[in-house]
Image (spheres, rainbow, N blue to C red):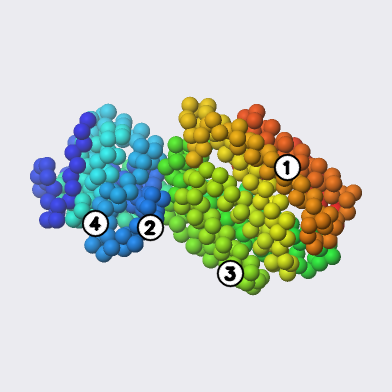
Amino acid sequence: MNSRVVAIASAGAISGGSAPTGAVLGAQHDRDLPLVVDLDGSLLRTDLLIECMLELVRRRPWTLPLLLLWLLRGRAYLKHRLALKAMPDLAVLPRNQAVIDYLSAQRAGGRRLVLATGADRILAGQIARDPPLFEEVIASDEGRNLDSRAKRDLLVQRFGRGGFDYLGNSWRDYRIWRSARKMLIVDNGGFPARFLQDPKVVRVFKRDQARTWPLMHALRPHHWLKNLLVFLPFALTFGGEAASLLWRAGLAFVSFCLCASSIYLLNDLLDLSADRRHPHKRQRALASGRLPLWHALAMIPLLTFTALLIAWPLSTAFVQVLAAYFVLMSLYSLGLKDIALLDVLILSAGYSLRVVGGAWVVGLEPSMWLVASTMMLFFSLALIKRYAELGLMESMSATAARGYRIEERDLLAAQGVGAGYLAVMLLALVGHGVVDSIRPVDARYFWPLLGLLFYWISYLWLMARRGGLAKDPLAFAVTDRISLGLLAAMGAATVMAK
């Protein structure tokens, strides 16, 4: 079925038929009245304007100043240029399956379905073909933006007041519902119960879950364990002798957690299309549409500002480290993550910055040898993740993933295992005061620590080789009993070595 796309002309005329002159009685059968369906947040579980902006940032971030120039010519022109320059992958956009099932049943019963959206006609026309449910598409064009008021006026002109039913999801749709015969609501949690009990409401599509948990999932609190590295300089130098400094390290930990979560949100926003095509990542809160995109956009500056606010009283050097981490990881999200080997080097550098920050915050000069050991360790762990991803892509008959080729798996394994063992050797030199000014530790506990670390690295690579490690190594570690036991033993050995 070919949907007829009706763009909004500057005069506001609609092609294709004249409007009824009178209101339609509410008793008229549903089949005799069109069902008009909104797009953003209703048929789709996302916002097309934000999707296009994110796609522009991902593809050509240097063109961002163009957004302001386009906006100066009007919102409609902005939407049109974004549709031409930065169209997202429409095939994988998250659909509202409950709405689609309902519309399919209505269509099968002979009802006329109309898609009416403020999105640009180029995007709306293509989305309306999958699934092919709509006989007509009413959308914005380069000359005029179909906001809620304009949409209401055009629908009343086209079908008459009370001459259509309307399916929407936002308070912005209220003026349209007032002019419709019946109301169908996609409730994203923003409507009071008394509104949903309005006699005109004939159908309410509820969210599958509350928003709190998708947001928490997007912040990835299980990855906050990585930020425990800020305690490492304190643990190796002071132990229990300077407990008064522990609170400073704790604040540094909180600051890094908030900053890292803002980066996770940014990365997920820029990775939407890739995540939606991934067998596991497509379940992420933003990729699946369980978390609105604008929530993430609002949380990024809030989290970053709060992290800097916490860091400011600790030390100027720590603030600089935190800012360097944010900039480095932002560049990673903006495209450096697609460059083979550079991506894992940047990730390992990010972990090393945690150690540097942890040293500055307790008044220590960072140990460059300890930083090097940390960087090698996390270089190894990052390569494990790439190795596992290539294995997953190979099982899906793909040939490459994120700048790496399937045939390079063995090379990554060699590099990763070597880097992990080098990290153990460097840590041994640091712990015994051979290469740095850190006070030597108690060998009775430090050598077992090194042995446990050596075994854990070997164990992770073995699991990856067997195909039992299909996610981030640290995320795997907190769910794997052997890894949890090894990490607990390493933590105890570190404390006792002081």
Measure the C-alpha gap from mark 4 to mark 3. 39 Å
Label for residue 401?
none
| SS for callout 3 | helix
How packed mark 3 is, by other alpha carbons closer than 10 Å (few <14, some 14-19, many 20 or more), is few
Residue appearing at x 32%, y 46% in the figure: 87
Q: Is residue 215 visible?
A: no
Residue appearing at x 59%, y 49% in the figure: 345
Residue receiving disc 4:
77
- Please tell me which of labels 4 and 1 falls first in the chain: 4
Across and down, in percent, residue 42 comes to 35, 45
Residue receiving disc 3:
309
Residue receiving disc 1:
421
Measure the C-alpha gap from mark 3 to mark 2. 29 Å
Q: Is 307 above or below relative to 422? A: below
Measure the C-alpha gap from mark 4 to mark 2. 20 Å
Across and down, in percent, residue 277 comes to 44, 36
